[in-house]
Amino acid sequence: DVKVTQSSRYLVKRTGEKVFLECVQDMDHENMFWYRQDPGLGLRLIYFSYDVKMKEKGDIPEGYSVSREKKERFSLILESASTNQTSMYLCASSPPIDRVGNTIYFGEGSWLTVV
Amino acid sequence: AQTVTQSQPEMSVQEAETVTLSCTYDTSESDYYLFWYKQPPSRQMILVIRQEAYKQQNATENRFSVNFQKAAKSFSLKISDSQLGDAAMYFCAYRSFGSARQLTFGSGTQLTVLP
């Protein structure tokens, strides 16, 4: 089974702090994603990575950056946390688009509260 | 850009009965994938069922089936013999064949199963 692991389930941070959310997948997937989930808005893509050191902005990249130094690890960084970044963050991974299946696999989510 | 619409924020069903969740989408592409994901209170996103747009046959997975109407851009999920464990938030999602990053989610339908 595919395993996508997010290192922290619950975090409470102060406004202005630098926050790291870590994600590791064990299936050698090329693609990795960070989503933000808010009530009534579904899941919105923050950043996407299709290879080591490669990244693309998603729909809501403002206030976030990412790092992918190794294929299995994709980090989301909040340079200066703000209260409007309080949310549930979901990491996901998938094989390349041309493989049979194309399923995206999700981690369990990280609840971030910024106070 | 693709959009996915789930017009039912909440649904309820009696245990052992059948319920249908609606999803419509808007796209100009001819090749794509559609998914239903389930998110129980644990927040783990679980793939329920997947449909390839080029396949006319509706996908089925045990008690879960879809009604895929490509011309109408409709992708509904039918849950038969509903069980208490089916209670969750259900998300419809669209994935473009031409772009690995392009996974768009609807806003979700909260399903309650009544004993």
Image (cartoon, rainbow, N blue to C red):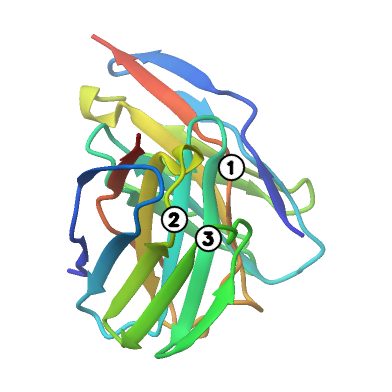
The mark lying in front, picked from 2 and 1, is: 2
Residue at image x 26%, y 66%?
A22
Question: In the image, what residue type sits under mark 2?
Answer: Ser
Q: Residue at x 27, y 67 (%)?
A: A23
Q: Which mark is residue A4?
A: none
At label 3, which amino acid type do we have? Ile
Asked which secondary structure carries label 3, the reply is strand
Residue under mark 3: which chain is it in?
A: A
Residue topped by disc 2: A80
Q: Residue at x 55, y 51 (%)?
A: A44
Q: Residues within 10 Å of mark 2 (few under 14, many from 20)?
A: some
Residues at marks 2 and 1 on the same chain:
no
- Residue of label 1: B106
Q: Residues within 10 Å of mark 1 (few under 14, many from 20)?
A: many
A79 in relation to A55, above or below: above
Give me the chain letter of mark 1: B
Write down the residue under mark 3: A46
Q: Nearer the viewer, mark 1 or mark 3?
A: 3
Residue A86 location in percent, x, y?
41, 39
Res B82 visible: yes
Label 2 marks a residue whose chain is A
Quick check: A20 left or right of A26? Answer: right
Q: For the residue labelled by badge 2, is the local secondary structure a helix, a strand or a loop? A: loop
Q: In this rendered view, identify the residue nearer to me: A27 or B97.
A: A27
Residue A60 picture quarter? bottom right
